[in-house]
Amino acid sequence: MENNALIVDSSPFPPGLDERLAAQLTFIAEVDRLKTVLRASPLAAADRRENDAEHSWHLALMVMLLAEYADEPIDVGHTMKLVIVHDLVEVYAGDSPVFDPAAVQGQREREAAAAGRLFPLLPEDQARTVRELWEEFEAGTTPEARFGRAMDRLEPMLLNWLNRGGTWQMPGATEGTVRAREAGVVTASASLGKAAELLVEHGLRNGWIRRDMEGVQPSS
């Protein structure tokens, strides 16, 4: 954003609205911006890129459906909260495609600054709760955060597979960088890690992922 204007500044709420509710609705309106933040990942069902809101919804659905494959017991509802919150800071920080080295420079600083600007729009207790959820996901030290982060790795891999390459075709994507993303799935689920391995192996065979070593050709 070029200025500090909020979405509600152009359409202020009517007088008399409860102060707490007004703060909550202001935050809800502001994160509508998430629907405009485009990711690098292409959709499977349409010829366009995924946006952050769609991505977060997809992760929440994946958590609900795939929780049985978690290596550690997880609180499904809490994990869904983590993935819904995890990209909210991108309303101000923007998306940082993992296979674009220039885009990820300064990512942590941009996102921390965005968190400091966005979350305080909420009432103090909810601002603290949402900030703690975001920080838990970022740290990845709880079973729920590990599984949520695994879904954050698996979802774009699935979209790439369905698009016969997708972001695997970006200049910064090679076998090594793709497998580094795969490792994030394995951390939380051996079963889903095996599925991710199959996608990567077949992606290599199909020529959708570049091998690290020069001169090595994808097998047929």
Image (tube, rainbow, N blue to C red):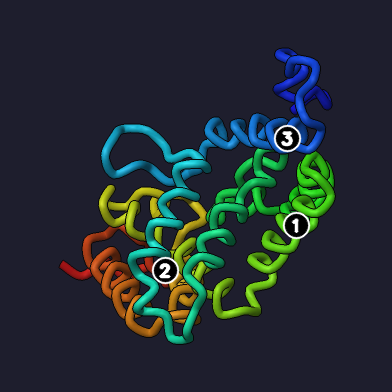
Q: In which quadrant of the rendered image does the C terminus lie? A: bottom left
Quadrant in which residue 19 is drawn:
top right
Residue linked to disc 3: 21
Q: Residue at x 77, y 49 (%)?
A: 115
Query: Measured along the vertical axis of the image, is residue 99 above or below residue 176?
Result: above
Instruction: Find the distance from the CA under tag 2 to the CA under tag 3.
Output: 49 Å
Q: Is residue 141 left or right of residue 159?
A: right
Front in this rendered view, residue 195 or 103: 195
> Which badge, 2 or 3, is on the more N-terminal residue?
3
> Which badge, 3 or 1, is on the more N-terminal residue?
3
Depth-wise, is mark 3 or mark 1 nearer the camera?
3
Depth-wise, is mark 2 or mark 3 nearer the camera?
3
Front in this rendered view, residue 162 or 152: 152
Identify the secondary structure beneath mark 2.
helix
Residue 89 locus on image (x, y percent): 69, 46
Q: Residue at x 58, y 51 (%)?
A: 100
Instruction: Find the distance from the CA under tag 2 to the CA under tag 1.
Output: 34 Å
Identify the secondary structure beneath mark 1.
helix
Neighbours of disc 3 within 10 Å: few (<14), some (14-19), many (20+): few
Q: Is residue 56 left or right of residue 204?
A: right
Depth-wise, is mark 2 or mark 1 nearer the camera?
1
Neighbours of disc 1 within 10 Å: few (<14), some (14-19), many (20+): some
Q: In which quadrant of the rendered image does the N terminus lie? A: top right
Residue 202 locus on image (x, y percent): 24, 68
Identify the secondary structure beneath mark 3.
helix
Residue 160's disc number: none
Residue linked to disc 1: 131
Front in this rendered view, residue 72 or 172: 72
The amino acid type, in three-letter code, at marker 3 is Leu
The amino acid type, in three-letter code, at marker 1 is Arg
Residue linked to disc 2: 175
Query: Measured along the vertical axis of the image, is residue 72 above or below residue 25?
Result: below
